[in-house]
Amino acid sequence: MPEAAHGHCFTRDWTCVACPAGTPWPCEPSKADLRIRLDAVDLREYLFACWRRAVVDLGVFADPARGNLYVRFVGWTEH
Ligand SMILES: [Zn+2]
């Protein structure tokens, strides 16, 4: 059985299915994977879409331990 990909695999609560339970998505492996598969514009667009859905799913004031959702989902694409 092939190893589960991190890139597009997340659960309803936005944790990665390939990482240890509870790891927030996008995890580091998924970021690396997405960077390879998408160019800068598509990457940002995709993560932006994810962020908008995550805000609905998790709430704007999601678990403070996870930090700002925008930074988590989109911020890292700016570097
Ligand atoms: Zn992962």
Image (spheres, rainbow, N blue to C red):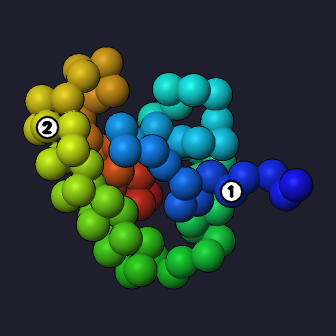
Residue 67 placement (x, y as % from top left): 28, 28
Q: Is 53 situated left or right of 72 in this image?
A: left
Quarter of the figure that contains the C terminus: bottom left
From this view, report whether residue 11 is shown above or below residue 42.
above
Q: Taking the image as drawn, is residue 25 in sight?
A: no
Point out the residue furthest to the right here.
Answer: 1
Q: Which mark is residue 39?
A: none
Residue 68 placement (x, y as % from top left): 23, 35
From this view, report whether residue 35 is shown above or below residue 22.
below
Q: Is 33 situated left or right of 53 in this image?
A: right
Q: Taking the image as drawn, is residue 13 in sight?
A: yes
Dot 1 falls on a residue whose secondary structure is: loop
From this view, report whether residue 33 is shown above or below residue 23.
below
Dot 2 falls on a residue whose secondary structure is: loop
Mark 1 belongs to which amino acid? Ala
Mark 2 belongs to which amino acid? Gly
Question: How far apart in space, not on screen, are marks 2 and 1 (Cα)?
Answer: 26 Å
Quarter of the figure that contains the N terminus: bottom right
The answer to which of marks 2 and 1 sits earlier in the sequence is: 1
Which residue is at 24% across, 22% downward?
63
Query: On the image, numbered disc 1 is attached to which residue?
Result: 5
Q: Is 37 situated left or right of 56 in this image?
A: right
Which residue is at 37% across, 44% downward?
12
Q: Which mark is residue 59?
A: 2
